[in-house]
Image (cartoon, rainbow, N blue to C red):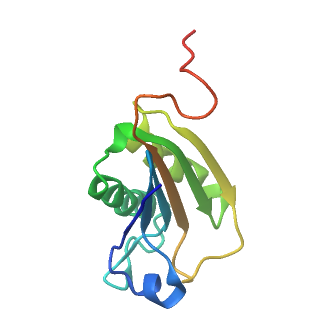
Amino acid sequence: MTLRRISSGGPYEELVGYSRAVVAGPWVLVAGSTATVDGEVVGVGDAHRQTLVAFEIALTAVREAGLDVVDVVRTRMYVRDINQQGAVGRAHQELFGDVRPAATMVEISGLVHPDLLVEVEVDAYRGTDPPPGGAEHRA
């Protein structure tokens, strides 16, 4: 399998040694993304805004890989304060409400900058076969 690495040019990618996303066969796996733009935290104190910005950064990598939001099959949200789940969940619903990927939200003790409230990950799938776990189930 050929791997393709996608970079956003962010400073942490080189410093830490990772890619914004890796395309592995039919999968696009996007690294943790935060609301950091040009080295500045966007939406300080606003978990909803930070979640939207972080997911848009992740979705930019998904689109660069040739997929789109409809191809997202899993999301993960790491929040510093689980009491912000409503704001974070509302942002997720605004972006993925029609897609309904498998999703996880967990509380963590901290992120790389004290003003960051949330970090997100996205997995997207391209292909004619269903993702692991079998065919789509309809009730």
* Whole-percent x, y for residue 28 in the image: 44, 53
* Whole-percent x, y for residue 95 in the image: 38, 44
User: Between 2 and 62, which is closer to the camera in this rendering?
Assistant: 2
Residue at coordinates 30% horizontally, 59% vertically from top-left? 60
Q: Residue pushed farthest bottom?
A: 15
* Whole-percent x, y for residue 118 in the image: 54, 65
Residue at coordinates 43% horizontally, 59% vertically from top-left? 2
* Whole-percent x, y for residue 111 in the image: 60, 77
Q: Is residue 14 left or right of residue 66?
A: right
User: Between 75 and 111, which is closer to the camera in this rendering?
Assistant: 75
Q: Residue pushed farthest front?
A: 1
Residue at coordinates 65% horizontally, 56% vertically from top-left? 83
| Residue 3, placed above or below residue 102 | below
Q: Residue pushed farthest top?
A: 139
| Residue 126, placed above or below residue 85 | above
Name which quarter of the figure residue 78 lies in.
bottom right
User: Between 88 and 17, which is closer to the camera in this rendering?
Assistant: 17
| Residue 35, placed above or below residue 107 | below
Residue at coordinates 31% horizontally, 83% vertically from top-left? 38
Name which quarter of the figure residue 7 lies in.
bottom left
- Give the quarter of the figure containing the C terminus: top right
> How many marks overall?
0
Name which quarter of the figure residue 132 lies in.
top right
| Residue 17, placed above or below residue 79 | below
